[in-house]
Image (tube, grey):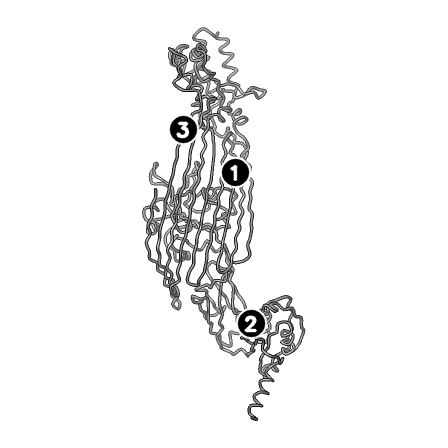
Amino acid sequence: MKHLITTKRVLCSLLFAVCSVAPWTIEASAQRSSNVTIKMTSVTVKNFFAELKKQTGLDFICSTELAESLPKVSLNAKDKPVREVLDELMAKVDCNYTIEGNIVTITKRQAGNSVTGRVVDENGEPLVGVSVTITGTGVGTVTDANGNYSLKVKPAQRNKEVTLSYLGMKTLTMPLRKLQATKVVTLESDNNLMADVIVTGYQTISKERATGSFGTMTSKQIDSKLNADLTQKLEGQIAGVVLDKDGNLSIRGIATLNAAIQPLIVVDGYPTECQLSELNPDNIENITVLKDGVAASIYGSRSANGVIIVTTKKGAEGKTKVSYRGSFKFEKKPNLDDLHMASTSDYIDAELALYELSPNSSSYNIAYRSSNQSEVNYLLTQRKAGKMSDAEFNSAIDKLRGNNVLRDMEKYMFRTAFTQTHNIGISGGNKVNKYNLAVNYTKNRSSYINTDNDRLLVDLKNEWNPYKFLTIGVAANVNYNRSNAPRTSFQSFTDFTSYLKPYSRLADDNGNLLNIRTISAATAELYESVSGLKDTDYNPVTDAYEDYSKTTGFSARFNGFLRFKIMEGLTAEVGGNWTRGNSTSKTISTSNSYRMRLAFNNGTSMSNTSNHYVPDGDMINETRYTNENWTVRTQVNFNRMFGKHRVTALAGNEVRRIT
């Protein structure tokens, strides 16, 4: 009986505050008071623990000998979690603590013991293979599949610092004492290090482990370039990737002049038939370009022109984040003097010289059905037919020498280009579900009149972890676009092979549009002699809105995968993608367009003028295109550390169909 009484007295002396143990766990008492506010200066740990008990309800157990040996402490904490306050206190008194239920046990740290803990990312996921080393020594270890580590520490190393490093994460350095008090260490992502990661579509590896020629571009680099087209953003960023004047992308050049140059585009691990311009540049995390023959070992003959691998952004654990990114871009009218074309006077002299070489080749009645006769040629035929004197001819020619059609084109056929882009991103999630939604709208008004396009992109990416061994991922992309442009490009006007010549006038000095001569005088007289025909007036400014092309496109792409964790370092995955798209292109010539008016006149029967072989109306030339493709892939991955050695392997198969 005496022995039992002595035991009870010892237990009572171990308790700084005597009270019944609360019937809830530490999670329950955290709900009662998850944070504490405390400000104490030079107090004993007994008084400090008494104050913590008042705020949290926790009981503290410590031996009398240890309590009396601990120094007085000072600590100032405002609305901090209990564990953070205890970590800071333990670092000051060189002790450890454990929490079981509602009881906190304090013990003295032992010299030469092991420091253990866990390393996770910002989403709370364990990081495998994190290097944990004591700075300035050869002592270190790496985390296992669950992110746990155990670091052997000698007494002489107690005051040193520890460095935690991991590819793609910011390196963290902290005192060993603080690390010992911190049970879980969180490493932050470092986007600047994404350039050191190579994404092949089937796996992600560090740059030093990759073979062959490759280039990378991170989201930070992508965002730094103000352009609504991802293809334009790549220009000048990766060696060997070239963008030509027509916007076509090539890698390492081309083998022959007529060879195909389109590289294979891989999005989120699966090959696609899309173009880079169809992707949302504000929703890209990383771009990897595989440039040489090593890509053939991964994608076979499809990689003949190189491979561009695009990884889109995904959600992260935390509160829902809503972001907006917009841009407005203005571009002045082009300066057509940069074309360095021959002057108006030189062009007229060339026409006159060609006429003198064969003066009988052009007469008033020759080729009366011709629908393209220049003003100089018209004057020559008028003079030859005796309808114009030499003085009148020379006066008309001198007047033409003062014209400059390029100035008129700049004024009436071009405008200030304007592009606006709006992107809204919504992302967030928790340990079970992470999501990312991006909606992008781009509207572009080009310099050339009646040329514009707009595009709407919707990207959705979701990832679930319903069980520790299972990860489910789905992604969807919807692309809707439309565009229109005049049927006749401005390049066909500036090369002077069409109706426009250097001396043509689009408008008079008051800005009134003028008609351009197209048909011969003989043809004009023929049309005038027949009733019911249409006029053949032509001006490229008005005709740009009467004779034009427009295109509408819609496509949808869906990705999905199931990833199973079989054992430490071993995973199995099955997934694939499905894409379907269609586009409709229409070339429309209205009944008022020059093309249809001329066709109506030329399609009228000369013997019976009421018979029109070309009816009066619009003409539509329509082309429809539909594509569908899918990919199914199964894959097994092995990635594990054995001491200082890493073993990585993958095996699988893939089936793909393109229609």
Q: Secondary structure at mark 2?
A: helix
The answer to whether marks 3 and 1 mark residues whose Cβ atoms lie closer than 8 Å is: no
Q: Is residue 160 visible?
A: no
**Whole-number angstrom distance, CA of label 2 to CA of label 3:** 75 Å
**Whole-number angstrom distance, CA of label 3 to CA of label 1:** 26 Å
Most extreme residue toward the bottom is 2
Q: Is residue 408 left or right of residue 251?
A: right
Write down the residue under mark 2: 26
Number of numbered labels in the structure image: 3
The relative height of residue 101 versus residue 339 in the rendered view (above or below) is below
Rendered location of residue 22, percent (x, y): 58, 75
Give the quadrant of residue 16.
bottom right
Density class for disc 3 (Cα within 10 Å; few <14, some 14-19, many ≥20) is few
The relative height of residue 121 versus residue 375 in the rendered view (above or below) is below
The answer to whether marks 2 and 3 mark residues whose Cβ atoms lie closer than 8 Å is: no
Write down the residue under mark 3: 621
Density class for disc 1 (Cα within 10 Å; few <14, some 14-19, many ≥20) is many
Q: Give the amino acid at mark 3.
A: Asn
Which of disc 1 and disc 3 is earlier in sequence?
1
Q: Secondary structure at mark 3?
A: strand
Rendered location of residue 500, percent (x, y): 47, 22
Which of disc 2 and disc 1 is earlier in sequence?
2
Position of the N terminus by quadrant = bottom right
Position of the C terminus by quadrant = top left
Q: Is residue 60 left or right of residue 340?
A: right
Q: Is residue 148 visible?
A: yes
Q: Secondary structure at mark 1?
A: strand
Q: Give the amino acid at mark 2.
A: Ile
Which of disc 3 and disc 2 is earlier in sequence?
2
Write down the residue under mark 1: 443
The relative height of residue 579 versus residue 615 in the rendered view (above or below) is below
| Disc nearest the viewer among 3 and 1 | 3
